[in-house]
Amino acid sequence: MSAELLRKLRKTIHEGSLAVCAIPTCPEISLNLLTPNYPRGKLTDEEMLAIIDRPAYWAFCWASGQVTARFLLDNPSICRNKTVLDFGSGSGVLSVAAALTGADFVIACDDDSNARTAILENARLNQVKKIKIIDDLRNLTLKPDVLVASDVLYDRENFGILEKLDKYCNLALIADSRVRDPSVFDKFTLLLQERSKTVPDLDESEEFSLVSLYERKFN
Ligand SMILES: C[S@@+](CC[C@H](N)C(=O)[O-])C[C@H]1O[C@@H](n2cnc3c(N)ncnc32)[C@H](O)[C@@H]1O
């Protein structure tokens, strides 16, 4: 477990702890994640503000991330010898999966500086070396072959990216369990739907456990 990450976590979840955890659906991948005994009681105002201000999304492996990582590991030709962009990397679970399946190069993009530290730590943990980190899509210096993104559409501002995916890739894989308007994915092909849970479990409503993985190809 990384002492630096624990220090960052505790700025948000004061009594939280981290542990190296093998992902249930992807035991090939281990991540530094929040331990399941995190405090679930009533939060103080200060804690509430810290969670809003600095959400530690990187300390979870989200349901959509798990399903997509398993899909990439089971279909290694998707990333092999490709340049892969992992948009909204969080813990870096998809970056690690892409690197493990032989991507030439992975670009992990996250606008949270703590997530960027987590991605580096988790890359090291899984002994993958080909991950470059950026904080904003505007800092991309090349057009990747493949874009992967899981659980990033909770932020409606990210819907805009769906309209210009061809600028970022030739193949996009987007996984989500929260969007309720099916027309958002009109131009996509549904690859699979699977039940999964965020690790550690956030006790979310069952409706958020059904992950849909969509594909869109260009050229
Ligand atoms: C819910 S987490 C999902 C993490 C990971 N993909 C997974 O499935 O476990 C969303 C992550 O996307 C990042 N994010 C959201 N919008 C972003 C944006 N516009 N640019 C860069 N990162 C973004 C957040 O900081 C967060 O780390």
Image (cartoon, grey):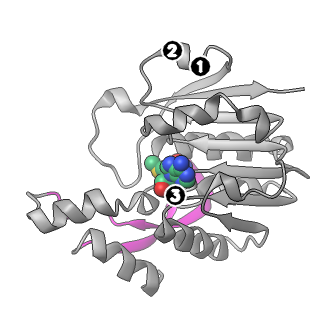
Does residue 202 show up magenta in the picture? Answer: no
Q: Regarding mark 1 in the picture, which secondary structure is present there? A: helix
- Quarter of the rendering containing residue 178: top left
Identify which residue is drawn at 70% across, 32% down. 164
- Residue holding disc 1: 185
- Residue holding disc 3: 90
Identify which residue is drawn at 10% across, 63% down. 45
Query: Which kind of residue does numbered mark 1 sit on?
Result: Phe
Query: Which kind of residue does numbered mark 3 sit on?
Result: Gly
Identify which residue is drawn at 74% across, 70% down. 128
Judged left or right of residue 216, residue 40 is left
Q: Earlier in the sequence, mark 2 or mark 3?
A: 3
Query: In this view of the protein, can residue 38 be seen by the observer?
Result: no
Residue 160 in percent (x, y) is at 57, 33
Helix, strand or loop: magenta stretch: strand
Give the magenta-colored segment's residue range: 16-40
Identify which residue is drawn at 80% across, 26% down. 217
